[in-house]
Amino acid sequence: MASPFSTRPALCGPLRAPRQMLADQTYDGHKSIHDDAMAADLGLRAGPIEGPTHFSQFDPLLVHLWGPAWFETGCISAHYQTMVVEGEQVRAFVELPPDGGQFTRIWAEKADGTPVLTGTASVGNGPHPPSEISQRIAKLKPSQQLVINRDLRVGQQGAGNPESVRMGVDQHMGPHYPFTLNDKLKVITEPGDWYTGAGSPWGRPIIPTEMISVLLGSTMDLAQFRGKGPAVGLFAGQEIRRIAGPLFVDHPYLLEREIVALSESARTESVWVKTRILDGVTRQLVAEMILNSATLKASYAKYDEEARMLGKVIEGGKA
């Protein structure tokens, strides 16, 4: 029977307190925004938890909705709205699509209702409405003059293409991600048997959605998509799309990166990078990620000086 109401019900997960695992993360030889001291210098009360950490809270809801197919052809696409620090609790929500629907809205909130992220989720490789990230890229306006990212270009390919990556259970993932998959599984907000291989429909352990970001981020320096620095950045939005998944633990993959957009806001300059994930054995395209890496203008000491040198319009004394 059709519902007389326009409001769609939603699946709601429990409140969880995600753990901060990036306090020792480094970029270009300096601490990242996830370090408490660095965060304090930028006016934050503590180092924020990395955005894709929250993706784990959606996995049980989306498997409940779409079954194992979520890990095979599922896409999660999110714009990060508010930073979360360790000790704060977060709840995930998934709007129930119509019967048989393969596309829906998602969001996450802190315990007090503060929005954490907003986005979309879908399953299947057929046509869908535009994802959250696709919508945002389509609405970008050309920048007057980038300063930090002035040497980067849309269409630029990663210097390391293709990059070879894999994620073993006890493999340290490098200075960007100073922990192992086992370390993460000990504190992940939503433990799952399939992550260890127990009862896996595919007969092998799979990589959690949030750790796909770690797999791809572990070799990001090879792409040489570097702006001016030193400067501090953060993830502002992210999309992970599995095409022929799941992604498996201790399996070889190849990465191909490309800059698909450049943009700026009043406080940041952004590089939008698409990373294609190929099976290292078959060369089949198995997944893609689009990441909006935003660099804080205020964290680059020479920003105003170089903005003026480049002829950028300065409003109120600031670029």
Image (cartoon, rainbow, N blue to C red):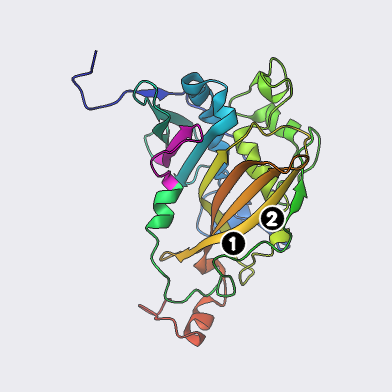
Comparing 155 with 57, the one in front is: 155
The residues tagged by marks 2 and 1 sit, at their Cα atoms, a distance apart of 16 Å
At a point 55% along the width and 40% down the height, the residue shown is 241
Q: Amino acid at mark 2?
A: Met
Highlighted magenta segment, given as a residue range: 115-132
**Residue 104 percent across, percent down from the top left:** 39, 32
Name the secondary structure under disc 2. Answer: helix
Q: Quadrant of the N terminus?
A: top left
Q: Earlier in the sequence, mark 2 or mark 1?
A: 2
Residue 64 appears in the rendering: yes
Comparing 19 with 295, the one in front is: 295
Residue 124 on the magenta segment: yes
* Pointer 2 residue: 220
Crowd tier of the residue under label 1, counting other residues whose Cα lies within 10 Å: few below 14, some 14–19, many 20 or above: many
Crowd tier of the residue under label 2, counting other residues whose Cα lies within 10 Å: few below 14, some 14–19, many 20 or above: some
* Pointer 1 residue: 232
With respect to residue 304, does 218 lie above or below?
A: above
Q: Amino acid at mark 1?
A: Val
